[in-house]
Image (cartoon, rainbow, N blue to C red):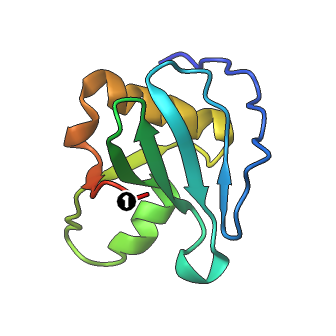
Amino acid sequence: MGVAIVPAMRRSTRERPGMRSIDTEDERIASLLIAEPPALHFEGSRDLVVRLRDGRSFVLTVLTLEALEARLGSAPSYVASGIVLVRRLSDGALLHAVRSALDRGLERFGTLQPPIEE
């Protein structure tokens, strides 16, 4: 399996406490927020909020293999929906995971969120 070289993503200026956004330069994605509240997740995982240009929003949980193994512990199985594996928690790997999920149907990997009332 080859390794893709992904250019570094520019950080948006619209950062929120515990959340940051990255520019995706993808016409399908309106915004991509990465939840980084240290007290709410363990090392090796992130929750992503993907807002699509069609108005739908999805939450994905992204884990490294090491983090998945830690969650599994000594149990014979681990069952969860909406989990995506990445080699590392870099912006490039997170964006690659989101684009891959979009290509395969984001509905299969993410949890649809209710519309935001403005």
Left or right: 115, with 100 as reference point: left
Type of amino acid under label 1: Glu
Left or right: 93, with 114 as reference point: right
**Number of residues whose C-alpha sits closer than 10 Å to that of mark 1, classed few (under 14), some (14–19) or many (20 or more):** few
User: Can you give x and y, in whole percent of width and height, for residue 39 in the image?
Assistant: 61, 83
**Residue for badge 1:** 117
User: Can you give x and y, in whole percent of width and height, for residue 50 in the image?
Assistant: 45, 44
Of 88 and 23, nearer the camera is: 23
User: Can you give x and y, in whole percent of width and height, for residue 88 in the image?
Assistant: 61, 46
Q: Residue at x 54, y 39 (%)?
A: 31
Q: Where is 23 relative to 67, above or below? A: above
Left or right: 73, with 109 as reference point: right
Q: Residue at x 38, y 54 (%)?
A: 59
Q: Where is 68 relative to 26, above or below? A: below
Q: Say whether residue 24 is visible.
A: yes
Residue farthest along the front direction in this orientation: 118
Residue farthest along the bottom direction in this orientation: 39
Q: Where is 65 relative to 86, above or below? A: below
Which image quarter is the C terminus in?
bottom left
Q: Would you identify the image quadrant in which residue 22 lies?
A: top right
Of 109 and 74, nearer the camera is: 109
Q: Residue at x 45, y 71 (%)?
A: 70
Of 4 and 54, nearer the camera is: 54
